[in-house]
Amino acid sequence: MTETIRSTEINEDKMHAFMGKVVGDFGASLSTILGYIGHKLGLYKALADSDGLTPAELAAKTNTTERYVREWLINQACGEYVHYDPQTGKYSMLPEQAVALTDEESPFYVGGGFYVIKAMLNAQPRIAEAFENGGGILWGEHDSDLFVGTEKFFRPGYTAHLVGEWIPALAGVKEKLEAGAKVADVGCGHGASTIIMAKAFPNSQFFGFDNHQASIATARTKAEAAGLAGRVHFAVSNAGEIPLDGYDLICFFDCLHDMGDPHGAAQRARQALAAGGSCLIVEPMAGNTVEENFNIVGRTFSGASTLCCTANSLALGGPALGAVASEDALREVAESAGFGSFERVSETPFNRIYEAKV
């Protein structure tokens, strides 16, 4: 094989272009870890709050070491995450950079991704073993930054779209929530989606379920801090065993594809719905064919899926739908659970939104 490759005439322009891409990916990978450090140490925030700082000034402001900060800033400027003024020797952040990297309330905030990627990289040894033995790694076995980063990454999108776009796209659901409804948020994690809905619909009761005990504890703390403890209830539960019935709305936010038994989870949701109830399924944006995922979003989600989503399902002996599960695959889950209709009702650059009804 090697001799065959060597004897094949290589197009030098294509070769250099490919090598440039690989080196660019090397730099991006290293920059992701440095981005995580920038968030943890407050480097981005300090820059965003200034009119420009030298490495020494940034180090002093963040109680860090100038020599490391100097090198970090060069890397960040190379990636155009920060702006450098050669006339003053100072670094700053353009408005777009500052919003995306420091404003957690903005729909453009992406800082959570650094936490997710750092946590997934820590799982690499076990994932490599799983490639060979077919096993996996449970969600709860990951670095805790995965849980923190997942909330940070998805919450801006939920804040921007859930109440204003996704719920109104479900026939009659907004009116039910305004009047007073019973809602289940399955796979709720730290409760970001549950709390967003509870704040918007004060007449309704919300129940968040997740099989990760530490996440449920965090969700309860966040609900109490938001003054919602009386209307928002969190409990540890597997998706296929959620308690109670009579829910007017049952939600799955970016989690159905991770599950060991998505069919069982969908079946339990159908059983637990009140008459005329709806199931809201939010999934990562993905194509219905393999090649439709050959873009920057598909690259990101398929990478995360390999290191986390697929691994969790396989660890539980599941079908491993993965983060680039096709619409046809998701429809099969809903239909096999007894839902009579399954319709895409909205979408964003990162998500597809479906309604399933009996």
Image (cartoon, rainbow, N blue to C red):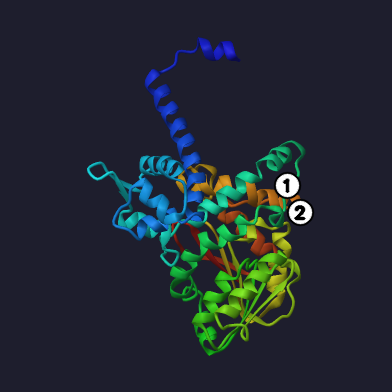
Q: Nearer the viewer, residue 333 or 85?
A: 85
Number of marks in the rendered image:
2
The disc labelled 2 sits on which kind of residue? Leu
Q: Nearer the viewer, residue 341 or 292?
A: 292
Tell me which label, 2 or 1, sits earlier in the chain. 1
What residue would you read off at disc 2? 316
Question: In the figure, 20 relative to 116: above or below?
Answer: above
Q: Is residue 31 visible?
A: yes
Q: List x then y, in percent, for residue 287.
A: 51, 50
Q: List x then y, in percent, for residue 296.
A: 45, 45
Judged from the image, the secondary structure of the residue bearing numbered disc 2 is loop
Q: Quadrant of residue 87?
A: top left
Judged from the image, the secondary structure of the residue bearing numbered disc 1 is loop
Mark 2–mark 1 CB contact (< 8 Å) = yes
Q: Nearer the viewer, residue 60 or 329?
A: 60
For disc 1, the neighbor class at 10 Å (few under 14, some 14 to 19, many from 20) is many
Q: Is residue 81 visible?
A: no
Which part of the image, by quadrant, shows the N terminus?
Answer: top right
Which residue lies at the image location 43% right of the left edge and 67% below the top edge? 105
What residue would you read off at disc 1? 136
Q: Residue furthest left?
A: 87
For disc 2, the neighbor class at 10 Å (few under 14, some 14 to 19, many from 20) is some
The disc labelled 1 sits on which kind of residue? Gly
